[in-house]
Each structure stands twice: as structure tokens, then as C-alpha cells.
Amino acid sequence: MSPLSPGLRLDGRRPNELRKIRCKLGVFNQPDGSAYLEQGNTKVLAAVYGPHEIRGSRTKALHDQALINCQYSMATFSTGERKRRPRGDRKSIEMSIHLRQALQAVIKTELYARSQIDIFVEVLQADGGNYCTCVNAATLALIDAGIPITEYMVACTASLANGETPLVDISHLEETSGGPNLTVAAMPMSGQIVLLEMSQRFHLDHLDKVMKHALRGCQEIKAVLDKAVRDHVASAGAACNWEFKTD
Amino acid sequence: MDAQYKVIDPVKFYRDHLAHKIRPDGRGLLKFRPAVINVDSIGTADGSAIVKIGNTTVVCGVKLELGVPKPEESNIGWLVPNVTLPPLCSPRFHPGPPSDEAQVASNMLAEILSNASVLDLRALCVVPERLAWAVYLDAVCLNHDGSILDACVVAAVAALRTVRLPRVEHDADKDITKVFPDERSSLPITGAPIPTTHAIFEDEVILVDPTSDEESLASGLVTITVQNDQMCSVYKPGGSPLADENMQACLSRARTRAIQMNNLIEAALAARDKEETKDQKLIS
């Protein structure tokens, strides 16, 4: 089934249109930093604890940087079929590792030697682009926790429809319809790619086009996240009577 | 300054507040936190509810599955409640197998739901001896700030009220099952147990609806569940002894709270119904 008839996707979006993003920072009081992010129907919650002392064995401590610990978990009711193992299965562990690899590239770990930063991500509703939404939510939670990061870490998916039209921010239906899925986690301001993953296949000639679309998706998502962060800081600052200058 | 004082000597910090009959979050000793309920927000679940009591947030999702009943219980389905306290909800919990607190909460939720006869399991049977519904009720705590059982049970009851069972046709001869996801009916929910947690501080002072800090300093906890103005369950895991007149006072507070919570659940469900009829009008 072609997802491009007539020129619109299944959910009514144009090929280069992102899903609606809604986000909120500082949603909970127990974690040091928390964020809730919705991209279309994918709803994700991220919580950051840290930096704190290393839990468990002290031998895991790194003498010159902080240890980053990520856990990716999906609620049992988040998918169409009930998920029997919310965490600990191979896919979740792989996602946790990818999450850590992406975030480790931006967190300034050298500032917190022998410490641990925990990042927990819970997917409440999964509708495609789970990893990307988790990365974006984790970035917001890190900002809310006040942990220094060099740049926003933003992730976006892209696909190729009918062998010629690139699609951005694919939903679950589009993911499972058989087309290629390209996931990119990048630092949008410097344009550096930190994580790249692809499934299915398409011709090498198309790679450049699809990647450009994914990176542009990252830039657009970053703009949305940045505005949310600034609004959050402005409202928190207004409550404390700060002066807010816009440059 | 205040925060440092709280870390250095938390008991004295609390005692000083209680001497003025006030708690650190500004509440009186017998004041409940505001509660918020939102239903049907998770699209992938067959029923869902999010409950926020103060800062404590619990999301409960229901998933339905079909199964073959056991031979000795051939005309009933299953209600499988579970409470998850993931590490993201509190710094006390770490990744790994379910903690003691999570297991106790799961057990309490299952007991309260069955004691209160919230759902008649015979209503889940589609074809005796052949096919029955299994209702998986998963309560995930997103932020643990005390009174977790209160939030979990209210979320579970509200989520069950939003569940719609699809119509199922089972051909016994050919052993074919057909599910009609567009023809749905509600579950017959016949109960609304509402728990209320109290904390006992230093054997004397009783605090209502404790936060996580208050629970950790408490010398005892008691949770009373009320349904239809009657006490249906009491959970008091050791701790300071509680005199009879204090227990009676807790019970009367629990009854008032139960009425308020039930009104809140009804209001949330009514708001959802209004949204649905509005959407249907837009579509048609």
C-alpha cells in the first residue's frame, strides 16, 4: 500500500512534515530533572537523577568522568499487543545502550568524576519513533536537572516512500509497512551525527537525500525543544522576579 | 537554610512544624492534597486513567487478552492487577527485580479489588470452558510522593470504568474466534473502594495523606479502604499502636474522602463522555 496517495501520508501529513510535538519540563518533584514529551501519539516520560554517588560496586567508578546509566522501559499497555517484558529483554537493553551512547556525547561528564548520572525513560504510548522521542525527552530532562551539556541531542527518523520520496518522522504504521527506516541522533547546531541506524534497504544514491531530510527534521525538532526550554526558564524566572533579556 | 536544616535533622525539622500545627508543604495536619483524575488518555490501552494526588502520580493501563479458562473455574475470566514502582518514580528504587514495596502494593491492590467485588469475573466469560477475557491492570507509578496505595486503587477503579469489551463470536465446532473491535460494551463494575492513608508521627500525631518524606519519618502507617460508606479493608503494617478512638476518627475521615474521590471519578468519566459525543458530532 503506497503511503503517498494522493501526496499525503496516512495520517494526513506532507512528506516533510513532523508530527505535533508537545512537551513539558519539570513535571515531577522526586527526580532531579524530568520531562514529558509527545511526538504525535508517542508519549514518553524521562527522569534524571544525579549526579550522585556510584550505586553498587565502587569499582565501576571512573576516575576522570561520570558514569552514565540509562534505562529504557516500555509500559505494558504502551503497544498494541500487551508487552510481556517491559524491560530486560534484548530490544530494551539495546535501546538503553544506544540512549547512553547518544547522551554520553553531549553530557560534560568530565565535570563529575567518580559520580553517576541516571537517566530513566518510560514509554507510555508507542506509535513509532520511540527511540527518537526518548532521546529528545532525555535531553529536556537533563536540561531541567541542570546537568551541563555541550548541545541539544536531538533524534529523528526518516524513510523513503515509493523508492523516491523521503518521509520525515515516521509513525508506527509507516515503520512496519516495509519501507526503510533511518534513525539519526545528531547535534543540530554543529551538524555532527552521533548515532545512525538503518533497517531495510534502499539504493545508495538516495542515502544523501534521506539523511538530509532526517537532519533537517532534527533542526526543526530542536527549534521546538529550545522554545519549550526558554518558556520554562522564563516562567520559573518570572516567579523569582528575574530580569529576562532577549538578545 | 531551610533545606539544610531539613537534611541535618529531619525529625526536629518536622517536630518544629507540627508544634505550630502545620506541615512543611503548608497543609494542616488533617488536610488532604488536591487530586486530579484524567481518563482514557493512553490510546494503545483498552482503558486507562492517570491519577495525581498532590505530586504522587500513577498511570493505570488496562490490556485485554483472550484465554482458555481453567477446568475447575470454567466460567470465570481473570483480573490481573499489578503495581510497578520503576526507578524513575523515586530515588529509593533501583533498576532490578520488583522491590518489596512494589510487591506489597501489587498484593494490596489485588486484595482490595477482590474484597470489594469490583468486578464479577463471571462477566468476563465468553463461552464457558472455552473462552474468557483476561483483564491485565498495570499501575505504573511515575512520581512517588507518598500515599501510593490511594492513587493506585483510584487509578485502577477509574481505568476499569473506561474499559470497553469488544463483542466476541466463537464457533465451537470450527474453533474459530471472531472479535468485533468496533462493537464494544462497558465492564460491569460494581464497586468503588477508595483507600485513605494516614501516618503516625512519634506515636502521637496523626497526619492525613502523607508525602514521601513524611512516610519515611513516620513511626506507623495505616490505610483504610472505604466502599459504599463501609470499611472494606484496613492495612496497618506494624508501627505505633493506634487507640480505638483514633482509628474511628481515621475511618470517618476516610469515608468523607471516599465520597469526594467518587465524585471526582464520576466527573472525569462524564467529561470524557462529553468529549466523545462532541467528537462523534464532528465526524457525523
Image (cartoon, coloured by chain):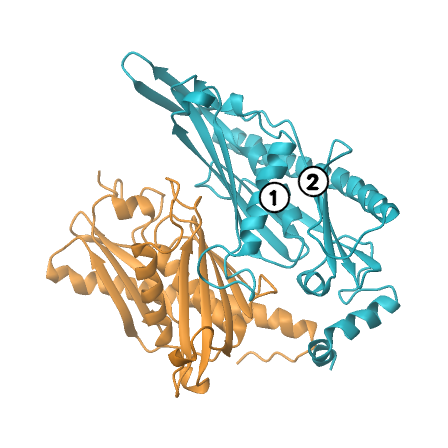
Chain colours: A orange, B cyan
Q: Disc 1 sits on a residue from what chain?
A: B
For label 2, the crowd category at 10 Å Cα-Cα, with few meaning under 14, some 14 to 19 and many 20 or more, is many
Secondary structure of the residue carrying numbered label 2? strand
**Coordinates of residue A121 in the picture (x, y in percent):** 44, 60
Q: Is residue A231 left or right of residue B249?
A: left
Which residue is at 66% across, 61% downward?
B212
Hey, what amino acid is under mark 2? Ile
**Coordinates of residue A205 in the picture (x, y in percent):** 11, 62
Q: Which of B83 and A152 is in front in this view?
A: B83
Q: Is residue B89 left or right of residue B203?
A: left
Q: What is the distance, in whole Å, between disc 1 and disc 2 at their CAs?
A: 13 Å
Which residue is at 38% across, 49% downward?
A85
The residue labelled by disc 2 is B194
The quarter of the image holding the N terminus of chain A is top left
For label 1, the crowd category at 10 Å Cα-Cα, with few meaning under 14, some 14 to 19 and many 20 or more, is many
B49 versus A27 height, above or below: above
Q: Nearer the viewer, residue B153 or B167?
A: B153
- Observer able to see residue A67: yes
Q: In this view, does A59 lie to the left or right of A202?
A: right
A241 versus A44 height, above or below: below
Q: Residue A18's image quarter? A: bottom left
Q: Residue B92's image quarter? A: bottom right
**Coordinates of residue A166 in the picture (x, y in percent):** 23, 55
Hey, what amino acid is under mark 1? Met
